[in-house]
Image (cartoon, rainbow, N blue to C red):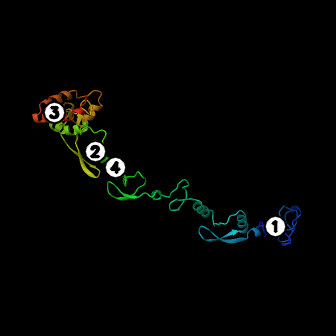
């Protein structure tokens, strides 16, 4: 072997072989027999392959299993500065994916496939910030903050706190506790009482439908309190009438309403109600006067 290049010396005084021009070489330099062909090679094909078939026993750096590697490949790897050997290409790729992978800045774990990440997980990201543990203001659970602005331990707790803040004056749409939706909810029972729990168009009676809501049984009426002017903010008793789902669909899908007498009916029916009923309707109108439609 050459002490400098670490290559095997085939043409040297130590080996007994001297370099000759390949075209003038008529005999194999390994076995000394005449060559069958007059090509550029210095040896028979068989002798050349026999020399190349010499293998070295190595150990895979990934699976720690022993394997044989041709000596010429081993020498070539050493000349290139490679000192890690593997039994197959898959093990080489697997080890290089981990060996050259970026490591987590907190736990120093390799992160293959995450070249742009600084941390292997969200928990490592949180722990690296060293935020103090604190108690959730809603449920009281002790948790570590994700950021300096974190207040609640989870999204449900944040939603619950937001709902509490939006009650009353915390809501930008709050108007002294009055709204047309609340006015409608309190006026709705009066319309059911006035129209005697039946559709004024087809006389269909009240028949509640049971269905499941959030895993619990709930009921829904088959009758609808309809706004004559289709303005949900106008909840005067003269503007509301009780009809069923079918008549409601017919009314809205027709080019002209098949029930033009609705307005006259509501006026006469409201005037013929009891004084107690009228007093309740009047008090609701006064309480929600700020939401009355113009």
Q: CA distance from mark 4 to mark 3?
A: 38 Å
Instruction: In the rendered structure, find residue 159 and report the number of the disc placed on it.
Output: 4
Query: Which circle, 3 or 2, is nearer the viewer?
Result: 2
Q: Residue at x 28, y 32 (%)?
A: 252
Q: Nearer the viewer, mark 4 or mark 1?
A: 4
Q: Which marked residue is nearer to the observer: mark 3 or mark 1?
A: 3
Q: Quadrant of residue 78?
A: bottom right
Q: Do residues under tags 2 and 1 come within 8 Å of each other at their CB atoms? A: no
- Distance, label 3 to label 1, CA atoms, is 118 Å
Name the residue tied to disc 1. Answer: 44
Q: Nearer the viewer, mark 2 or mark 1?
A: 2
Instruction: Determine whether the residue tagged by mark 1 lies in a helix, strand or loop.
Output: loop
Is 265 drawn above or below residue 115 in the view shown? above
Image coordinates for residue 49, horizontal then vertical, percent: 76, 67
Location of residue 127 with respect to 232 vertically, above or below: below
Q: Quadrant of the N terminus?
A: bottom right
The Cα atoms of the two marked residues, 4 and 1, are separated by 84 Å
Residue 233 found in image quarter: top left
Q: Position of residue 68 (x, y in %)?
A: 67, 70
Callout 3–callout 2 Cβ contact below 8 Å? no
At 15% across and 38% down in the image, what residue appears?
Answer: 193
- Label 1 crowd bin: few (<14), some (14–19), many (20+), radius 10 Å: many
Q: Disc number at residue 167?
A: 2
Q: Is residue 240 left or right of residue 5?
A: left
- Of pointers 2 and 4, the one earlier in the residue sequence: 4
Callout 4 crowding tier (Cα within 10 Å): few <14, some 14–19, many ≥20? few
* 3 or 2: tag closer to the N-terminus: 2
Q: Is residue 206 above or below residue 227?
A: below
Q: Secondary structure at mark 4?
A: helix
Comes first in the chain, label 4 or label 1: 1
The residue beneath circle 3 is 282
């Amino acid at each position: 072997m050459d002490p400098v290049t670490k290559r095997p010396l085939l043409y040297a005084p130590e080996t007994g072989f001297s370099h000759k021009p390949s075209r003038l070489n008529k005999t194999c330099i390994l076995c000394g027999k005449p060559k069958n062909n007059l090509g550029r090679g210095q040896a028979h094909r068989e002798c050349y392959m026999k020399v190349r078939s010499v293998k070295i026993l190595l150990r895979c750096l990934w699976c720690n299993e022993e394997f044989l590697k041709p000596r010429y490949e081993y020498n070539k790897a050493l000349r290139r500065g490679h000192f890690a050997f593997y039994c197959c290409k898959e093990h080489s790729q697997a080890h290089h994916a981990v060996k050259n992978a970026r490591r987590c800045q907190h736990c120093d774990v390799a992160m293959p496939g995450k070249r742009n990440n600084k941390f292997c997980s969200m928990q490592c990201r949180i722990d690296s910030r060293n935020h103090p543990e604190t108690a959730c203001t809603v449920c009281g659970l002790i948790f570590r903050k994700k950021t300096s602005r974190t207040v609640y331990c989870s999204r449900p707790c944040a939603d619950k706190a937001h709902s509490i803040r939006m009650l009353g004056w915390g809501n930008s749409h709050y108007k002294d506790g009055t709204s047309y939706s609340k006015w409608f909810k309190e006026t709705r029972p009066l319309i059911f009482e006035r129209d005697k729990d039946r559709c004024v168009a087809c006389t269909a009676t009240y028949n509640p439908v049971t269905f499941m809501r959030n895993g619990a049984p709930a009921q829904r009426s088959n009758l609808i309190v309809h706004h004559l002017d289709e303005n949900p903010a106008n909840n005067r008793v003269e503007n509301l009438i009780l009809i069923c789902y079918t008549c409601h669909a017919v009314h809205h899908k027709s080019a002209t309403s098949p029930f033009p007498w609705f307005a006259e009916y509501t006026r006469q029916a409201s005037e013929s109600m009891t004084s107690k009923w009228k007093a309740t309707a009047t008090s609701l109108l006064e309480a929600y006067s700020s939401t009355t439609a113009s």
